[in-house]
Image (spheres, rainbow, N blue to C red):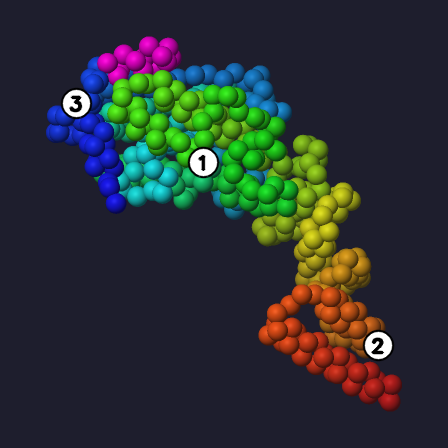
Amino acid sequence: MESLSDKLKALGVKLGLDQTEPSGVTSKTTQADITDLLPDAKLIPTIHGETLWVEEVYHGARMHGRFQVKRQSNFLPMLQLLGTDVDFDLETCVFMDTETTGLAGGTGILAFMVGLGFFRGDDFYLYQGFLRDPTEELAMLTYIAGLLEGKNTVVTYNGKSFDVPLMHTRCTLNGLEKLFAPMYHIDLLHLARKLWKYRLPSRTLGMVENEILGFHRSAEEVPGWMVPELYFEYQKTGDSTVVLPVFYHNAMDILSLGVLLQVTASLLDNPASLDSPGVDTVSVARMAAEQGNIEKAVALYEQGLQDDMPTEVYVETLLRFATIYKRDKLWHSACVLWEKAAEKGSLCACEELAKYYEHTSKEYQVAIQWVNQGFKFFEEMKLGGYERTRMEKAWQHRLERLLDKWARQNKS
């Protein structure tokens, strides 16, 4: 497989001490094209040479889909659910996304554009660094180090798996400290997967933008899979117009991160504040229960179950909710939930009810009724031979044990 340097050399790009010029275009011409087309672009001097950056300010009143950009969230519940005690403040956050020469990662992949977003008051400041030539990477990384001073939290979307490891690799290869290593990392993809697993068919940033933020990108947008090829085309021809859509793509990624963090925090604080559907509310309840905030989980489960939702989500929610009451031995409340789940055909609910009436209340005849109900559901299930045999034996064993207990109870 060709390395990045092999690919770039094949395109005629100057690398390190290799003095080959891009065919038909000089580095100076490329600079002029970029700065002419991007009026907000600046050439920033560093001790390692110049680095090109575009800066833009999004004022707080600006709408991004259904939401304003400005700060409007209580972040404490989110931090509690994340299980962190980081000294969090929105102005100490950096929102980061990269555009790269490949999508698989590895030492041969270059981040030719790095987008960084910062809140200052209600306004959102966007910085985009761009490599006119791969030899400018050290200068760009040096400038980023300065921008990150005073920041303690990095926010990404799938950044734990891709962007941050890639940036750390690039820092190491350039002899620099890993820029994001000391920071607490909030990866919004991980939260999106927990919050919207019931609601969205996928949790890509584009899907979340459309369905949660109500934001749809303009005709300037370019698909992410095209981004590497556009950069190679720019390096080959010197035509900077081909990378202009990448600036828009990256800018919207970063702006969406800034808004999505706040929407996520608001949802985790109080789903009712966003008029969220029941499936979102029970997702927050599940997260609260996992973190031990049982009081909040109970309130949210009760609230969420009042809304319509798909049957499979409804049943799963009833079973999760019942687990809280079972743990605290609040059997009446647990049984009410199990019975509602059983009404929807839940074999698991029948099993829990059979276990309760056998082992806790010693009402063997009622337990037998629930085992028989379970058999009816079991017969309707499409199971493979081994699994069907295993379950059938387990349920038959339970029934025989209950019949024996009931018989002995009636004799006494």
Q: Quickly name the residue at label 2.
A: 365
- Please tell me which residue is depicted at 33% across the width and 10% down the height of the picture: 36
Is label 1 or label 3 in front?
3
Residues under numbered marks 1 and 3 in contact, where contact means CB atoms less than 8 Å apart: no
* Left or right: 224 as drawn, with respect to 130: right
- SS assignment at label 2: helix
Q: Quickly name the residue at label 1.
A: 156
- Please tell me which residue is depicted at 45% across the width and 35% down the height of the picture: 155
Residue 112 on image: x %, y %:
31, 29
| Figure quadrant of the C terminus | bottom right
- Please tell me which residue is depicted at 52% across the width and 46% down the height of the picture: 83
Secondary structure mostly seen in magenta is: helix
Q: Nearer the viewer, residue 328 or 250?
A: 250
Residue 46 on image: x %, y %:
23, 21
Q: Quickly name the residue at label 3.
A: 21
Quote the CA–CA distance across marks 1 and 2: 56 Å
Q: Is residue 379 above or below residue 27?
A: below
* Left or right: 113 as drawn, with respect to 57: left
* Left or right: 296 as drawn, with respect to 151: right
Q: Which residues are magenta?
A: 29-42
Residue 405 on image: x %, y %:
79, 84
Q: Is residue 14 above or below residue 200?
A: above
Quote the CA–CA distance across marks 2 and 3: 88 Å
Residue 158 on image: x %, y %:
45, 40
Q: State which tag comes first along the sequence, 1 or 2.
A: 1
Estimate how packed mark 3 is, as few (under 14), some (14 to 19) or many (20 or more) residues with alpha carbons within 10 Å: some
Q: Amino acid at mark 2?
A: Gln
Q: Amino acid at mark 3?
A: Glu
- Please tell me which residue is depicted at 64% across the width and 76% down the height of the picture: 389
Q: Amino acid at mark 1?
A: Thr
Res. 374 visible in picture: no
